[in-house]
């Protein structure tokens, strides 16, 4: 594992108490309406008008939606210091595991299953980079399949527990990680693009480090999905304020094409994200339950930190979650069939350099 550059380490926020983490998951979101207003150019399509859509508790910047491509973002965009405060140390779990034992096992099992999809068509020994690799759930499974695995993370805390076979570099952004041109056969950016202040710049850098014809797999919540439309401001996958951008598939594909990629497939089913999104979004619509309460309850807590919420609330969250599970799986499968999954991942090829 690579040594973290000192500048990146110095820019990290001080650890926050678990109560701060819980407050971030529960930040109130309310819908907004109003006419389109002039804004900075949209990073996906360049349009310069957007309409207000959501207000987030504690922030003055609203989330606005582009009138052309439907990309939603904070306007004005949040500064680096504000964004850093959304990621206290306990956000990443302790140590190297974000959830309790049972749910953590499920996450890693799905990660191994996911590796089978990512391995398709790739020769043994191919060099793979995971941008925003976190604790490396997928990297370990890919290493088991004979790939040379690399990861990039902004935070050492986020990468705690990563598979030792992975070369992980800690840097404030991908360009600062220092990878050579055309170095990788495949790049993954899995539910990370929506967290970044500069998604266009990140995709341009991915194109530089990916060999011509190499494969990019990018996954984001689908802002135009059935689940997003049904849940509105209570949608679990909004994950405000950490998600700085909300991508509809049209905007994501347009951004990929504009940065030198050819989208070839998009997939609308994720066992890891989509059913739980239905469950938590449905609970969020009940005023008697805390926002994102079940997700908060499933988080692994540091030793000595008590379980959140009263016993009655914890019982309600778990029981309702279990009762909603069959419905959530059915809604996820139906949405995937209709190509309107709550999350979407796009497979794209790096286009050849222009003469």
Image (cartoon, grey):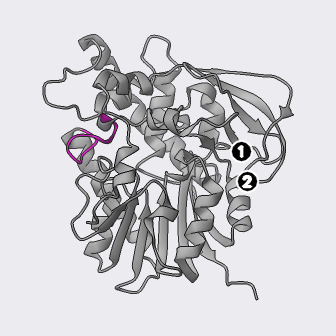
Tag 2, which secondary structure?
loop
Which residue is at the front of the view, 205 or 112?
205
- Estimate the x, y position of residue 326 in percent, counting from the top left: 42, 38
Q: Residue at x 44, y 32 (%)?
A: 85
Screen quadrant of the C terminus: bottom right
Q: Residue at x 45, y 10 (%)?
A: 288
- Estimate the x, y position of residue 257 in percent, counting from the top left: 72, 67
Is residue 337 in view from this perspective? Answer: yes
Which residue is at the front of the view, 324 or 47?
47
153 in relation to 26, above or below: below
Q: Residue at x 37, y 64 (%)?
A: 151
Tag 1, which secondary structure?
loop
Q: Is residue 206 magenta?
A: no
Q: Marks 1 and 2: in contact by CB < 8 Å?
A: yes
158 in relation to 144, above or below: above
Which residue is at the front of the view, 203 or 274?
203
Q: Which residues are magenta?
A: 90-99
Q: Is residue 92 magenta?
A: yes
Looking at the rendering, which quadrant does residue 350 occupy?
A: bottom right
Q: Residues within 10 Å of mark 1 (few under 14, many from 20)?
A: many
Residue 203: assigned label:
none
Residue 44: assigned label:
2
What secondary structure is the magenta-colored segment mainly? loop
Q: Residue at x 58, y 60 (%)?
A: 202
Give left or right: position of 250 versus 317: right
Is residue 329 in view from this perspective? Answer: no
Screen quadrant of the N terminus: bottom left
| Mark 1 lies on residue | 71
Looking at the rendering, which quadrant does residue 144 occupy?
A: bottom left
């Amino acid at each position: 594992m690579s040594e973290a550059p000192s500048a990146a380490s110095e820019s990290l926020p001080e650890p926050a108490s678990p109560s701060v983490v819980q407050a971030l998951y529960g930040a109130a979101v309310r819908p907004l309406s109003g006419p389109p207003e002039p804004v900075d150019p949209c990073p996906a399509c360049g349009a310069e008008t957007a309409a207000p859509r959501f207000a987030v508790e504690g922030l003055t910047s609203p989330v606005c939606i582009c009138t052309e491509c439907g990309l939603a973002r904070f306007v004005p965009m949040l500064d680096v210091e504000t964004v850093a405060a959304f990621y206290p140390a306990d956000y990443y779990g302790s140590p190297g595991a974000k959830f309790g034992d049972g749910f953590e096992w499920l996450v890693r099992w799905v990660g191994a299953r996911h590796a089978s999809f990512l391995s398709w068509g790739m020769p043994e020994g191919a060099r793979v980079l995971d941008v925003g690799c976190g604790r490396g759930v997928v990297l370990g499974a890919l290493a088991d399949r004979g790939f040379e695995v690399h990861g990039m993370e902004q935070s050492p805390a986020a990468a705690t527990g990563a598979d030792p076979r992975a070369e992980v570099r800690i840097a404030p952004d991908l360009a600062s990680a220092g990878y050579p041109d055309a170095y990788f056969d495949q790049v993954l950016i899995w539910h990370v693009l929506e967290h970044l202040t500069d998604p266009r710049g990140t995709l341009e850098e991915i194109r530089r480090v990916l060999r011509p014809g190499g494969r990019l797999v990018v996954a984001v919540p689908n802002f135009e999905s059935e689940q997003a439309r049904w849940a509105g401001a209570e949608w679990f996958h909004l994950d405000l304020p950490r998600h700085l951008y909300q991508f509809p598939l049209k905007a994501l594909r347009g951004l990929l094409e504009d940065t030198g990629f050819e989208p070839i497939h998009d997939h609308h089913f994720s066992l890891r994200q989509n059913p739980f999104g239905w469950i938590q979004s449905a609970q969020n619509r009940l005023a008697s339950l805390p926002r994102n309460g079940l997700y908060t309850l499933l988080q692994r807590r540091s030793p000595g930190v008590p379980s959140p919420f009263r016993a009655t609330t914890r019982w309600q969250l778990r029981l309702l979650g279990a009762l909603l599970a069959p419905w959530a799986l059915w809604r996820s499968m139906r949405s995937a069939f209709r190509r309107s999954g709550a999350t979407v991942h796009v497979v794209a090829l790096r286009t050849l350099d222009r003469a």
